[in-house]
Amino acid sequence: MMKNVSGSFTVEAALVLPLILFCILLMLNQGLELYGEMVETAEQQKMWEEFAPADDFRKLELLLKYQDIGGNYGNNI
């Protein structure tokens, strides 16, 4: 009733191996894209760290505060 089907490993490998290689290359491509996005994000983060608008604002407020308190001495700053 049931026939014994025999196949060679070469035929099975010829069908499965391209699929496995395609999956590996797809994952590698996605990994490289994620790495590129991470590099861009890191560069933008460095720009914002160097910019530091909050620190500049605090320093300006502190300078204005000392000018108001110091009178003539504050004007020399």
Image (cartoon, helix red, strand yellow):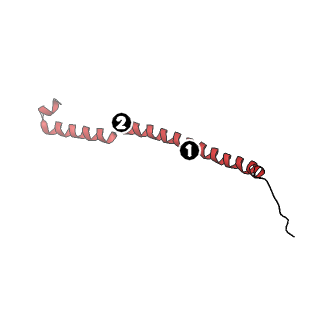
C-alpha distance separating marks 2 and 1:
29 Å
Furthest residue in direction top, as rendered: 76
Dot 2 crowding, Cα within 10 Å, few <14, some 14–19, many 20+: few
The residue positioned 56% from the left and 41% from the top of the image is: 32
Q: Which mark is residue 31?
A: 1
Whether residue 24 sits left or right of residue 18 in the image: it is left
Image coordinates of residue 70 in percent, x first then y, are 13, 36
| Amino acid carrying mark 1 in the image | Gly
Asked if residue 10 is positioned above or below residue 70 in the image, the reply reads below
Asked if residue 13 is positioned above or below residue 40 in the image, the reply reads below
Q: Nearer the viewer, residue 14 or 67?
A: 14
Nearer the camera: disc 2 or disc 1:
1
Image coordinates of residue 57 in percent, x first then y, are 29, 40
The residue positioned 17% from the left and 38% from the top of the image is: 66
Image coordinates of residue 46 in percent, x first then y, are 40, 37
| Amino acid carrying mark 2 in the image | Glu
Q: In terms of image quadrants, where is residue 45?
A: top left
Q: Secondary structure at mark 1?
A: helix
The residue positioned 21% from the left and 37% from the top of the image is: 63
Dot 1 crowding, Cα within 10 Å, few <14, some 14–19, many 20+: few
Q: Nearer the viewer, residue 33 or 12?
A: 12
